[in-house]
Image: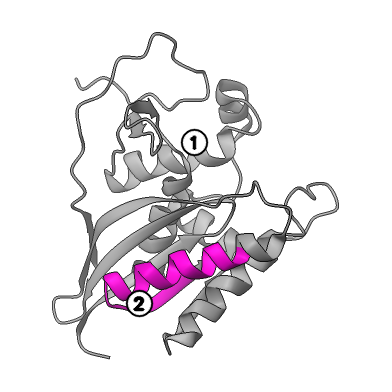
C-alpha cells in the first residue's frame, strides 16, 4: 500500500452512513472528502436481495474511489435491543465479501471504543437523554462531541434522493465520520484529520424537531 491512499468507513444498516477518507502517511494526515448515505431498497421479501444491493453499492464505491482499505463498525447483540439483529450481521457480511472480492483489507471497529474516543463516553449523559430523547441522543451526543472536541460541523439538511429537495439532516453519516476519525487517529496514529466536504447554508424549516442538533450561536 502506498503512503497516500483512500479509505472507506461504513456504519452498516438499512440506511448506512459512509465516509471517504484520503490518508497521507507521509504528512501523517487524513482528509474526509465525502460522506453520504447508502439506502437499501427493502420493499422486496428477500433479505438476499437487500444484501446483494449492499454488496453492489459497496463494490461501486470501492471501485469509483480506488479504495485500499475498508473500516466497518462491529455489531453488538443485546437481549434488550433486538431490532435489526437478523439483517444487520448480513449487511456486514455483504460488506466483508465485497471488500475481499476485490482483495481489499478490512478492519472491524469496536463500538464502545470509537464512541469513547470521540465523546469521552460510550453512551449519552442523562442530561442529553432529557434534552434530545433517549433514542435520538444516541447519535446527537456524537454529533455534539464532533463539534466541541474536533470542530466538525454538519449541515442542518440533506437532499432527498427522490425529490431533490432539502430534508432534515440524515444522521446516519455522523457515526461514519466519527468512526473514520477514530480509526485514523487511534489505530493509525495520524495527527491531523480534516473534513473538506463543503457545508451548504442552513435551510429554514417550518418545524424544527427536538431530535435535530442545533449548533451554538457564535459569540
Q: Which residue lies at the image location 37% right of the left edge and 50% below the top edge?
A: 36
Quadrant where the C terminus lies?
Answer: top left
Q: Is residue 49 left or right of residue 211?
A: right
Count the numbered circles shown: 2
Residue 184 sits in which quadrant? bottom left
Q: Please determine whether, in this image, residue 64 is positioned above or below residue 121.
A: below
The answer to whether 40 is drawn above or below residue 190 in the figure is above
Q: Residue at x 52, y 40 (%)?
A: 139
103 left or right, relative to 28? right
- Residue 102 lies in quadrant: bottom left
Q: Are marks 2 and 1 in contact (CB under 8 Å)?
A: no
Secondary structure beneath dot 1 equals: helix
Residue 204 in view: yes
Q: Which residue ends up furthest to the right in the rendered image?
A: 79
Relative to 103, does residue 19 appear above or below in the rendering? above
Horizontal and vertical percent for residue 147?
33, 40
Magenta-span inclusion, residue 58:
yes
Q: Residue furthest left?
A: 27
Judge whether residue 73 can be spotted in this image: no
Q: Which residue is mark 2?
A: 188
Quickly name the residue at label 1: 140
Instruction: Pick whichever, 40 or 90, lies toward us.
Output: 40
Q: Mark 1: few, some, or many residues within 10 Å (few <14, many ≥20)?
A: many
Task: Identify which residue is drawn at 34% across, 45% down.
Answer: 149
Q: Quadrant of residue 153?
A: top left
Q: Which residues are magenta?
A: 51-71
Residue 182 location, x and y as percent?
Answer: 41, 63
Amino acid at each position: 500500500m502506498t503512503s497516500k491512499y483512500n479509505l472507506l468507513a461504513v456504519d452498516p444498516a438499512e440506511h448506512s452512513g459512509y465516509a471517504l477518507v484520503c490518508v497521507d502517511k507521509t504528512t501523517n494526515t487524513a482528509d474526509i472528502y465525502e460522506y453520504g448515505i447508502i439506502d437499501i431498497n427493502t420493499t422486496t421479501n428477500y433479505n438476499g436481495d437487500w444484501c446483494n444491493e449492499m454488496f453492489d453499492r459497496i463494490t461501486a464505491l470501492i471501485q469509483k474511489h480506488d479504495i485500499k482499505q475498508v473500516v466497518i463498525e462491529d455489531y453488538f447483540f443485546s437481549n434488550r435491543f433486538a431490532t435489526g439483529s437478523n439483517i444487520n450481521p448480513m449487511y456486514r457480511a455483504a460488506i466483508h465479501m465485497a471488500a475481499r472480492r476485490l482483495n481489499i483489507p478490512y478492519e472491524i471497529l469496536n463500538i464502545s471504543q470509537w464512541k469513547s474516543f470521540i465523546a469521552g463516553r460510550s453512551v449519552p449523559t442523562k442530561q442529553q437523554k432529557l434534552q434530545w430523547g433517549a433514542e435520538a441522543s444516541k447519535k446527537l451526543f456524537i454529533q455534539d462531541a464532533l463539534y466541541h472536541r474536533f470542530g466538525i460541523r454538519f449541515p442542518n439538511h440533506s437532499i432527498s434522493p427522490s425529490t431533490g429537495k432539502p430534508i432534515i439532516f440524515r444522521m446516519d453519516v455522523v457515526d461514519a465520520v466519527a468512526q473514520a476519525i477514530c480509526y485514523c487517529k487511534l489505530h493509525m496514529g495520524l495527527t491531523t484529520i480534516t473534513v473538506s466536504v463543503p457545508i451548504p447554508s442552513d435551510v429554514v424549516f417550518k418545524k424544527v424537531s427536538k431530535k435535530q442538533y442545533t449548533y451554538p450561536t457564535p459569540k
